[in-house]
Image: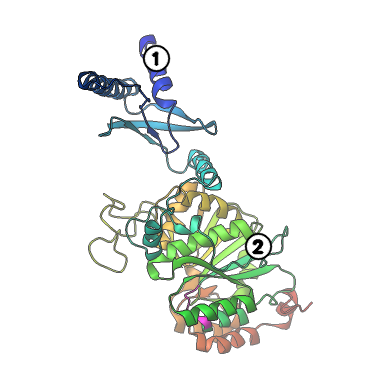
Amino acid sequence: MNHRAWQLREFLKRTVLKPLEKRGTCGLHKELNLPRTRGTLCRYLVYSLTFVTMCATLWTLVLGGGEVITVTFSSSNDIVKAVYKCAYENPDGSVDLVFNIPRGGEELLRLNSLSARDSAKGNKTDNSSSSEEESREKGVKGSLYPISLNSEYLINSVTVCPAGQEVDYLIIVHSATAYFARRRAIRETYGSKRLFGHLTHRLVFLLGRTSDPTATKQIQDEAVINKDIVQGRFIDSYHNLTHKGVLGFRWISEHCPLARVVIKIDDDVFLNPFKLVREVLPEVSNRSRVISCHVRKSGTSVVVRGKGKWVVHEDEFKGYKYYPFDYCNGYMVILTGDLIRPMLNAARLNPFFWIDDVYLFGILPATVGGTKFVDMRGVLTLKFDVAKTCFESKGADCKLLAVSQWRPEESERLWYTVLSNLTESAKTELHVFGKS
C-alpha cells in the first residue's frame, strides 16, 4: 500500500471508525446548526450525501474487501481483529460497515465480553421488549438469541453444589413439566446423592414454564422438597429445548462452576452409574475441552427443508445441504467442565436455532474452537429391550452406559437387577451407598 493510500486509510479510521458503536454500525452524523432557508438546507443534504458516498467508496477501494484491521470499541478500549467485507448506505445517510470475525477464534470470545458488560450495565438487550420476549418464549421465528441468557429464573436451586468445592460429576436432566414420575425415578436410582460414598456428585432438573396452574403448584412443591429444580421463563415445549440447554449452561456457570464433568441427559434415559464411575470418569476427568456422545460427523446429517420433524427455515444454513460441523445426538452427552463457560459465551454470539442438538453440541463447540469429540455410540442405545436384556443378564457389567426410551414404571426392577448383579468387592471399591 503506498503512502497516500495509507494516509487516506488513517483518515478514514479517525473519521469513520472512531464513532463505531458496539454493534459495528458507524453513524456519520453531526449535530449541525442549519440555516432555515430551503436552498441552504438542500445544499447541506447534497454535501452530506456526497461525503458519505465518497467515504464508503474510498474505504472499499483502500481496504479491498479483505484486509484485516483492528476495531477499538471506545467505551471499553477492547480491540477485536476483524476482516472488512463491505459498506452499506442507509436511507438516513448513515453508513453500515460490515466486518467478519472468523469462527472459532479467541476474537469471538473477546467480543462476547462486550455483550456481557452491556447486560451488566443494564443496556437494552434482545429481550428488552415484552413482544420480543413473548416471541422467544413461544419459540417462533424472530428470536435472536436464547432468552435464557439473561432472563430471571422462575425457580432457582442455588444450594445444589457445595460452595467453593469441586463436584466430581453433575447430572443435568432436561425434563418436561408433567413428568413427575420420571424425575422421582431418577432421584431414587442412578441420580441418588447417596449412591457413591467417595465422590461428590449432584443432580439438577431443567424445566420451562407451564400454563397449567396445578402443575405449576406441584413443581413449586417439588422444588421445595427436593431442592433440585431449575425453571426458566420460556414455555416448556419441544421447540424451546435450545433455551433449556442454554439455561443449563448458565446455571452451571453461576452455581456449580467447579463441576469437573457435566452429564447432560434426557429424562427418558437410564444411566449405568457404575460403568460411568469405573470406566468413563477416569478417562474424562483430567482432559480438556472434550465432548463424549453419539457423534454426528460433519457433512453427514441433512439440513431438512420443506417438511419434516426437524425442518429448518430457508434463511438458516442457507446454501448448506448438510450441517458443516460435528455435533451430538443430545439424549446423553458428557462434557468436561472447562467447556461450560466458553459455550455459554458462544451462545451470546450465535442467534437462536431451535434444533437443540445442533445448536448446543454443534454450533457452540464450533464457535469455541479446539473441542474434541469422542464417539460413544458403541455404549449407547435407543433400543430399550436390547438394554433390558443386557442389564438383566450382566447387571452392572453390561457394556451399555445409557439407554434412551426407558419406561419409568420399570425403573425399580431394572435398577434392582443392576444392583443385584454388583459384586461385594465392586460395592466396596465404589463405596456404594457409603459402603467402605
Spot occupied by residue 324 in the image (x, y as percentages of width and height): 36, 51
* For the residues bearing labels 1 and 2, Cβ distance under 8 angstroms: no
Q: Does dot 2 land on a helix, a strand or a loop?
A: helix
Residue 184 at what x, y percent from top left?
Answer: 57, 82
Residue 405 x %, y %: 45, 79
Earlier along the polypeptide chain: callout 1 or callout 2? 1
- Along the horizontal axis of the image, is 246 left or right of 47? right
The residues bearing labels 1 and 2 have C-alpha atoms spaced at a distance of 57 Å
Which mark is nearer the camera, 1 or 2?
1
Q: Residue at x 57, y 89 (%)?
A: 413
Residue shown at 33% from the left, 62% from the top: 140
Q: What residue type is labelled 1?
A: Trp
Number of on-image labels: 2
**Residue lying furthest top:** 3
Q: Quadrant of residue 394?
A: bottom right
Which amino acid, mark 2? Pro
Mark 2 surroundings: few (<14), some (14-19) or many (≥20) residues within 10 A: few
Pick whichever, 283 or 126, lies toward us. 126
Residue placed most toward the observer, 326 or 83 = 83
Q: Can residue 294 be seen in this view?
A: no
The kind of secondary structure the magenta stretch mainly shows is loop
Mark 1, residue position: 6
Bin the neighbour count of mark 1 within 10 Å (Cα to Cα): few under 14, some 14-19, many 20 and up: few
State the extent of the magenta-drawn residues as a range: 175-180
Horizontal side of residue 79 vs 199, given as left or right: left
Which residue is tagged 2?
282
- Decide if residue 124 is on the left or right side of residue 320: right
Instruction: Say which quadrant the N terminus sits in.
Output: top left
Seen from the viewer's position, the closer of residues 37 and 356 is: 37
